[in-house]
Image (tube, helix red, strand yellow):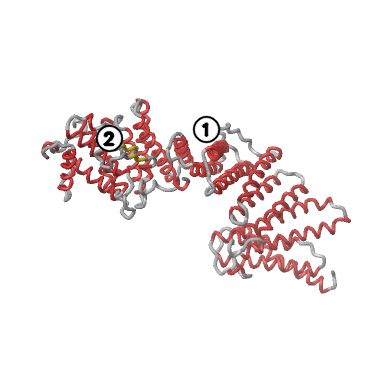
Amino acid sequence: AMESISRSPPARSPQEQAPAPTHAHTQTHTHAHPHPLTRTRTHSHAHAHAHTHTRTHPDAMAAAMERGILEAAGLMASPAPDERKPFENKYRAREILKGLLGMLGDSGPTEEEEKAKAIVRNLFEKMGEKAPDEHKLRGPEGEGAERMDERKRNWLGRLHHLMGVNYCETEEASQSKEHLRRAVKYLTPDRLKHPAELVECYNYMSINASNRTDFQKAKELCESGVSLYKDAKSEGKTEGDAKRARELEDAHTLTLFYLAQVEGHLGNGPMSARYLLLTMARQLDGAKDFNPKEFVNNAITIAGFHLNSARYRQADHCLKAAEHVLQTRWKANERDNEEKEEALANIQRTWGALHLHRLRAEEPDQKCEKVFANLDLDPSPEYERCIEYKTSRKAFLAGKKVMEEAAAFFVLDGFVTDHIKILQELSQFWKLLAMREADPTRRARMHKRRINLLRPVLHEISQAAYGQEYQQLADEVASSYVKIFDCKEQIFPSVSTAKRPKAVAKMNSLLQNAILYYRVFMRGFHENFGPDPPAKMDGYLQPPYLQARFHVARLLAKIVADSIPAKCKLDTASYEEYKEIVKLCERYDCKEFVEELKICKEMVDLLPAKIKNWQRRAANGEV
């Protein structure tokens, strides 16, 4: 469904038997007699708008009209008998509708006019009646909708509505436009008598506008449908008629769904998410085809959207709704039990993401619209902003717990990218908590936890198969070693003289490991993971690559050497790295490495003199 937010309302597929926007809640029940003029009961909010039984109309014309509408609606709602001809029934329905429009004098001359007349005559013959003369069926040319006989006006509105829907479902949007426009024209004077039909007209017109990328027009049409729905509800026009009430509710649900899509195209993410939530809440209230799997996945997706805007309470509300539906309405069998377990793991993972966002010290938006109030969910708490260590630790523990539960399902063997992503998020939990930790020893241990999480995976996966993931892990492992080094460097002045050689060796080891994994990261940019940088590199790849080389050059100079020749060798390696960075910046014409490049050029100027000094001292026998 979050895909639905980012796309225009769905186009009809020739393989679909019942197109989603119209028949989302359609069920057709046909009794023993298959002939359309027998007592056939059709339940569809899109097509079965023959609300008056034939016997309630004393004249033959009214009886033929109502029976014809019912027959056409039944054909449109029923699946095609041959999958190779998915629109066969709809084409048959169209001919009936053309004939009925001809009876009312609303059809122009066409090459199929005689065929349409034959269908009308057949309708009368089935009732044992004689068809009226053609001139008696036609209305005066140019007759206005307001001055037209109410019964005729309603028939015309309903027929054009069905014709417009029919053309939409057969993927002939250009033909549907005029019929939908006429349906609105004829139904508007009695708009509260046919609200479901009118709302559906607005829905289809909004689809057509969206397919033309006129999203503002699509939004206006949807809003017209919402306004009509509210008026019909306030006037109680569907009270006492459960079928018509259901049709109106279903049409309004689709209006909200289309509004979610349109708002997404217009760049209004929060409103798009809100309309999608309202759509989901309405589906909970009685949709016959309610899909708990889709509901859960959509709720998770929308929760993630709200997290990106620090709306933690709204995300909390969505996740609790997802949990409730998964536990109470998702009846999994053996075949889809794994899907249910995966959905639960994704819920846990999103709970973890909520606490991870909190650890980033974002100012929470405490607004929360309780769109799933009918589920009797626990209230969403007001989440504190995580600045101090105590508050942050609570978020850390809560998030770490659910992330580890999610990782138990998304194991490396079978869910490589998901497993790696979860481990990276767990690493971020330790990193963000370490930022609040004042003790450098404890802080170093937290970063060591990050390395223990990520480094083993580098020995389990192929860099060729998972290049991007491999590079991300290598970069994070390298930066974790640097963080530990920084902690050890802070502690070093307080280390006793006797323990300093061991401390220096440890710090050197940290630097060497950091350099190793930065180089692993850099090799991912090279052809066939070789030693030489590429001749060309895309602009967005240049900063991370050059930054890694910059770290290597800087860290080489930090290693404590045990002799002058060793120090000379380290400074020479650092100089060569700085010189290579300057050369690559010129080759790539890099525009986003300005400050670091200045430092590199300074080091290229300064280091030769320093290296010569080391060489001179080594030549004099100094060690």
Residue at left 50%, top 44%?
A: 293
In front of the other: 506 or 57 = 57
Q: Nearer the viewer, mark 2 or mark 1?
A: 2
Tell whether 208 sits left or right of 296. left
* Rendered image: mark on residue 50: 2
Residue drawn 56% across the image and 62% down it: 590
**Residue 584: percent from the left, percent from the top?**
60, 66
User: How far apart are the alpha carbons under marks 2 and 1?
Assistant: 36 Å
Residue at label 1?
375
Of 353 and 86, the residue lying toward us = 86
**Helix, strand or loop at disc 2?**
loop
Disc 1 residue crowd, few under 14, some 14–19, many 20+, Cα 10 Å: some
Q: How crowded is mark 2: few (under 14 residues within 10 Å), some or many (20 or more)?
A: some
Q: Is residue 168 left or right of residue 267?
A: left
Residue 466 is situated, as x and y percent measured from the top left of the image, at 59, 61
Q: Image height check: is 175 above or below 374?
A: below
Relative to 242, residue 431 above or below: below
For residue 8, say whether it is visible.
Answer: yes
The numbered dot on residue 485 is: none
Mark 2: amino acid: Ala
Secondary structure under tag 1 reads: helix
